Image (spheres, grey):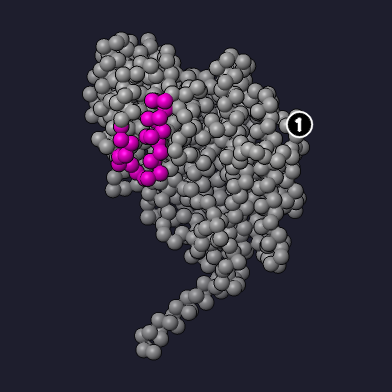
Amino acid sequence: MSHTLGTSVVLGLSLILCATSVAADKPNILWLTSEDHGPEMGCYGDANARTPNIDALAAKGMLFKRAWSVAPVCAPARSVIISGLYTSSSGGQHMRSMVPLPDSVRLYPQYLRDAGYYCTNNSKEDFNVQKPKQLWNASSGTAHWRNRPEGQPFFAIFNSTKSHESQIRTRPHKQVADPAKMRVPAYHPDTPEVRQDWAQYYDKVSEADEDAGKHLKEIEAAGLAADTIVFYYGDHGSGMPRSKRWPCNSGLHVPMVVFFPEKWKHLAPKEYQPGGKSDRMVSFVDLAPTLLSIVGIEPPAWMQGHAFAGSFQTEPQPFLFGERGRMDERMDLVRSVTDGRYVYLRNYFPHVSQGQRVAYQFETPTTRVWRSQFDEGKTNDAQSIFWRVPKPPEELYDLQHDRDEVRNLASHSEHQETLERLRSAQRKHLVSIRDVCFLPEAELHSRTVGSTPYELARNDAKYPMDRIVAAAELASNLDSAALAELKKLLNDSDSAVRWWASLGHLMRGQAAVAANQEALQNALQDEASPVRIVAAQALGMFGDDATTAIALNVLRDLSSPQKNGVLVSMSALAAIEALGDRANSLHPFVLKLDPNGDSPDERYNSYVPRLIQNITAGSEFKDLVPVQGKAGGKKANRKEK
């Protein structure tokens, strides 16, 4: 052996031994996660639940009464966890978007591995942000802490899919829970189908609990219970409609239970008591900094959460924040905030319903029977909110007296102080995290060329956030007095401001479009395709026959993925679909479209075919739009999960 080679070997062994030595006195960390279920568990006081394993964990550990996912669907929720950034700040909010992150932003397994941890993920990743190679030591259905080198501390995730939305409607099913004993929320109709789905949901949560119990027993059998910190959480609210995909409490409130063995209680949350319940509000954005804090790493300043355990834990925060963007091919923009009692939602797309037709959601019997009853006029006020258009720009709910969030207090004089406090918190939050998702998605990518959405959001020249968000606020408040200012904004120098100005006209309907028809016709020539698309939709919906014909030609030109790319095509096709019968002349053209085109990621591939199918095939269930004649859709080739 040469002297140089010998020195290298010795140095390498020294580094390994050093890392092992540093990590030797660190706790193991086990994360047990399950999909698509809220706090419907025994330890949270639910009498219908059968969850003995997590109940036992909570009895010796502690549960958080007020834990929120940031997003009400899995991919953005997981993106927040892995990065420590809100997806509205990283740009990874829209389903399957796969945006890049700056080199300076490292995902938490990178930090843990540097600290000497063996990191495994079993097995789902499903992020909306790009990950580096070799993020985990192992990430697969066989990944396990047992495979680590002897003596090395581990961080291990085991995710159960037993409670996933898809399992609620899988038939046949061996029923255990009694449908007659189910509590039907005020927003759901009380039908046999709804009760069956809720009962099956509880059965599936029990199966997820069994999975967690199996992994806890493995730790005990290996003699590692005294050295292993355990976290358990669900990834967002239940898979039932109006929970999953909707960023109110029913969609964001998750179970979260932690256990710190005696040896590691000094790393536990300050309020930790065995068998206790914490009022501290915790968010998924807090998980990455909390992990780093537990292993002795000070969380970097760019992480947007707050550690609630470990050496660097912070004081409890006053608010939790939620967000919703595009769900498959259905665009929306909602931001929410809670102080633990009240929930505030700001709807920036009030012209679309809460219940936009996401094909995957319509596979659940509850969704179909609920929509059918609404169409037949059989739903009461609370049950109709989900489907109505327009949504109110602001919603405020008091969880203490309205757990199902069906009585909107935003217009009540006695709640104006609360409304303003939460509204102010929401607006300050947008600014503090640099919410970049107020751009049309096509521009989120086009303005990012050579950079990342996160960096774009911090470049005022490329993303004048104050002006864009102000335009969004004005456009979506539905106040008719804003129309004159919206007309001026159609000539703004920034295309995103012009886009919001166009949306403001579309949202206000016939009278607004008629009042500024010439300005909107000029917008059909805008250099930015998102502006042209919205102006064309507004004129196509509310213009005369001649104006509609011109608008349809614009949408036809922009609907080809080969010519315009998938993102522009999606927007144009969504506008054509919204026009319903007024766009019948385009249907033969749409039917012949080649759905392939440039896109940010191959995971977009199902969206254009689904829109084509929706437009040309129609459906029994169709989204409400403020125009006579509506278009719907059928099941897609690739499903959102």
Which residue ends up furthest to the front in the rendered image? 172
Compared with 97, 541 (above or below) is above
Q: Where is residue 538 in the image (x, y as percent from the top left)?
A: 34, 18
Q: What element carries label 1?
A: helix
Compared with 267, 411 (above or below) is above
Q: Does the magenta stretch include residue 162?
A: no
Front one among 282 and 132: 132
Q: Where is residue 29 in the image (x, y as percent from the top left)?
A: 61, 59
Let me know if residue 568 appears in the view: no
| Image side of residue 60 versus residue 248, left or right | right
Q: Which residue is drawn at 72% across and 30% down?
A: 183
Name the residue beneath numbered marker 1.
181
Let me know if residue 223 appears in the view: yes
Q: Where is residue 190 in the image (x, y as percent from the top left)?
A: 68, 23
Q: Residue at x 29, y 45 (%)?
A: 449
Q: Is residue 596 magenta?
A: yes
Front one among 461 and 50: 50
Q: Position of residue 588 (x, y in %)?
A: 31, 24
Q: Residue at x 52, y 58 (%)?
A: 140
Compared with 551, 51 (above or below) is below
Give, as a three-letter code, the residue at label 1.
Answer: Lys
Q: Residue at x 68, y 26 (%)?
A: 192
Please report the bounds of the magenta region as a residue range: 593-617
Front one among 600 and 342: 600
